[in-house]
Image (cartoon, rainbow, N blue to C red):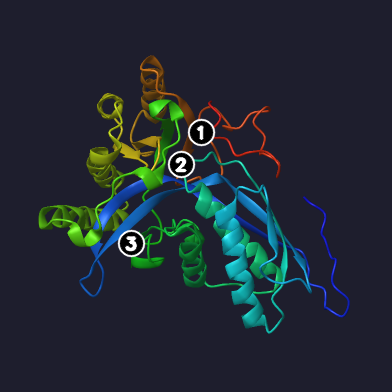
Amino acid sequence: MIPAARTSAPGAEPLPLGTGHAPCHHGEILQGTFLDDAGRRCAGLVTLPMAGPGSSAEFHPRPGTPPDVLTVVPADRTKAAKAAALAVAQCAEEAGRPACGGELRLVGDLPVGLGMGSSTSDVIAAVRAVADTYGRRLAPATVARLAVRAELASDPLMLDGRPVLFAQREGRVLEVLGPALPPLVVVSCTLGGGAPVDTLSLPARPPAETDDADLRAFERLRTLLRRAVATGDAQLLGEVATASAHRGQRILGHPEFETLTAISRRAGAVGVQIAHSGAVAGVLFDPAAPGLHRRVRACLRALDAHGIPTTRIFTTLTTTKELLHGPAHRGGDRPAGPDTPRRTARLPAL
């Protein structure tokens, strides 16, 4: 870890080094327009959690310096820097301590542009590091509010994997779907050669302009996903994820989509999920189904035959271990240092 910095201006009380971490996700299971409790239409999503990769942050406070004097390493993590400044104001007020500037350092092993929440992971790690400096433990709703202010739209990574329908542009939970997703084995792959997707350039219809037929379709998928979580039904979850991925192709238009769904059917998977704002995708298997290893290996062979690179195999049940092939990260694929640009292609291949 980076050594703590405890410099302070004369007369200012020192503040300790703060650290924070945040996970990533593996794209969305469901994304669309939904109704909130007041009947208002709003954009929402349900992400697929994935343990392992993530972002870590260290906040080196400099008491006595203005709170807007804040540097970030690497310098291109501007959203995280904004989040840290917002968190300083929030936490200093709560703690009754002077707000101060400092240096934010980030390390991580997430590629950008794949739809895995890399920027949100940076942002939440930064907020948690500042909160740690001030001895605060911010509520998830507060972290979500700061994250949305910093990056306009945020993934629900501050909820640490709980399955929720989350309004990403408002930073609030529309519905808690249950304590955990049904167990799944996920064969992760990248579409479009792993090229990053510029999410800001994607066409987006405001929720208020969603037509009634689409709204009914999204609400039906929401109901089915709620049932899948309540009953632990991996097959039903796969159907929801596939339907959502199919609707997402109106915008993303991945040329490999039909191939991916055909491979899923032939391998006996329950469905596919695709990041609605990136290139990462997953073939979903029920771990309780007979012949799991045979099915997964058939899937891997088919993906390879069609030139779709696989990246890792993970499970929502045993989230700390990789399956079949061991860890996805090998010797040459170590997490980047603070001065290393974030990768823009894909996760390390198996």
Three-letter amino acid code at disc 2?
Answer: Thr
Q: Residues within 10 Å of mark 3 (few under 14, many from 20)?
A: many
Q: Residues within 10 Å of mark 2 (few under 14, many from 20)?
A: many
Q: Which residue is mark 1?
A: 323
Q: Write the residue at 25% across / 27% down.
A: 258
Q: Write the residue at 31% across / 45% down.
A: 234
Three-letter amino acid code at disc 1?
Answer: Leu
**Distance from label 1 to label 3 (Cα)?**
27 Å
- Residue 177 - label: 3
Q: Residue 345: horizontal and vertical position, in percent?
A: 51, 31
**Distance from label 2 to label 1 (Cα)?**
8 Å
Judge by depth and name the residue closer to the eye, 169 or 226: 169
Q: Which residue is mark 2?
A: 315
Name the element at disc 1. loop
Task: First in sequence, mark 1 or 3: give its number.
Answer: 3
Name the element at disc 2. strand
Q: Write the residue at 72% across / 72% down.
A: 66
- Residue 173 - label: none
Judge by depth and name the residue closer to the eye, 28 or 224: 28
Q: Is residue 293 visible?
A: yes
